[in-house]
Image: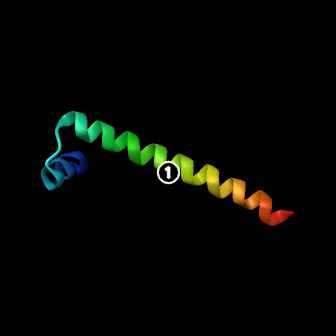
């Protein structure tokens, strides 16, 4: 069973819901990495 199929059954999502969830996870990871990179520059000062 694919990850998306398992998520679809577990959280009762539609195909659009799965796509939106993947986008949300992707952008959350990107934003968290940017924030961590910004905090690193403050630490080095």
Say whether residue 35 is left or right of residue 25. right
Residue drawn at 59 percent across, 53 percent down: 33
Circle 1 SS class: helix
Query: Looking at this rendering, what residue extends furthest in the bottom direction?
Result: 43
In which quarter of the view is residue 19 placed?
top left
Residue drawn at 13 percent across, 48 percent down: 12
The picture places residue 4, in percent across and down from the top left corner, at 23, 46
Residue drawn at 35 percent across, 43 percent down: 22
Say whether residue 10 is left or right of residue 36. left
Q: How many labels does the image show?
A: 1
Query: Looking at this rendering, what residue extends furthest in the top direction?
Result: 16
Say whether residue 34 is left or right of residue 20. right
The picture places residue 36, in percent across and down from the top left corner, at 64, 58
In the rendered image, the vertical position of residue 34 relative to residue 16, given as above or below: below
Colouring used for the render: rainbow
Q: Residues within 10 Å of mark 1 (few under 14, many from 20)?
A: few
Tell which of 20 and 7 is nearer to you. Answer: 20
The picture places residue 24, in percent across and down from the top left corner, at 39, 44
Which residue is disc 1 drawn over? 29
In which quarter of the view is residue 20 placed?
top left
Residue drawn at 63 percent across, 49 percent down: 34
In the rendered image, the vertical position of residue 9 relative to residue 42, given as above or below: above
Q: Quadrant of the C terminus?
A: bottom right
The picture places residue 14, in percent across and down from the top left corner, at 16, 38
Say whether residue 11 is left or right of residue 22. left
């Amino acid at each position: 069973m694919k990850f998306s199929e398992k998520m679809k059954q577990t959280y009762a999502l539609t195909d659009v819901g799965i796509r939106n969830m993947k986008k949300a996870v992707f952008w959350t990871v990107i934003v968290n990495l940017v924030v961590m990179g910004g905090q690193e520059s403050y630490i080095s000062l």
